[in-house]
Image: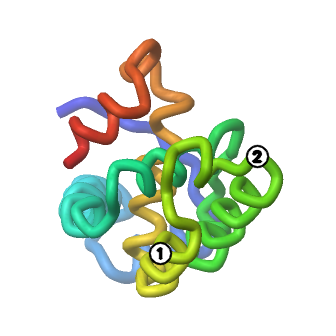
Amino acid sequence: MPQVAARITYDHEKWLKNYFKTKSAGAEFILPWAVDMFFKTLKGVVDDFSLPELKTILESHRDVKLLPNQSKQAYLLLRVEEACNEKNAHNQHGASRSSLEIKLKRLTDLQATALMIWATAYWVSKTWNGVSLEEYVKLSG
């Protein structure tokens, strides 16, 4: 099995040791579980948005560094609002700002985080370099 070297906080290390036999056993469980939860959550939430809305969400994450402590619905709303106010991202992609806002407000933090990871991945992953916004959205649906 491939190895991953992750940096974790002291509290995370303590939690892994308390809930699993070893820190490594905990990490070996949590990482695959988190990836599975990400894809399951993403699949469930992407279908609720239109193509223009998803492209607007993608646009709002251009040049964004996603941080774990900012992985909440409130941050997603803020990023999309900022992109709409400053760059008219919703108009650029043909999305209704009010409809998008209503849908974003219904999301849980987990759903919002999945969307933020998905949106940020488009801009930073070498896999998607050269793939159009539209193609990326269609492949995710």
- Residue 100: x and y in percent read 49, 70
Looking at the picture, does residue 24 appear above or below residue 59?
below
Q: Residue at x 50, y 49 (%)?
A: 94
Instruction: Judge left or right: residue 43 versus residue 64.
Output: left
Extreme-top residue of the structure: 130
* Occupied quadrant, residue 8: bottom right
Is residue 77 at all visible to an observer of this figure? Answer: yes
Residue 15 or residue 43, whichever sits in front: 43
Looking at the picture, does residue 31 appear above or below residue 18?
above
Among numbered discs 2 and 1, the one appearing first in the sequence = 2
Instruction: Judge left or right: residue 82 versus residue 120.
Output: right
Residue 94 or residue 81, whichever sits in front: 94
- Residue 26: x and y in percent read 31, 65
- Residue 11: x and y in percent read 60, 75
Q: Secondary structure at mark 2?
A: helix
Label 1 crowd (10 A; few <14 / some 14-19 / many >=20): few
Q: Which residue is mark 1?
A: 99
Q: Which residue is mark 2?
A: 87
Q: Residue at x 47, y 26 (%)?
A: 125
- Residue 30: x and y in percent read 30, 63
Q: Secondary structure at mark 1?
A: helix
Q: Residue at x 53, y 70 (%)?
A: 12
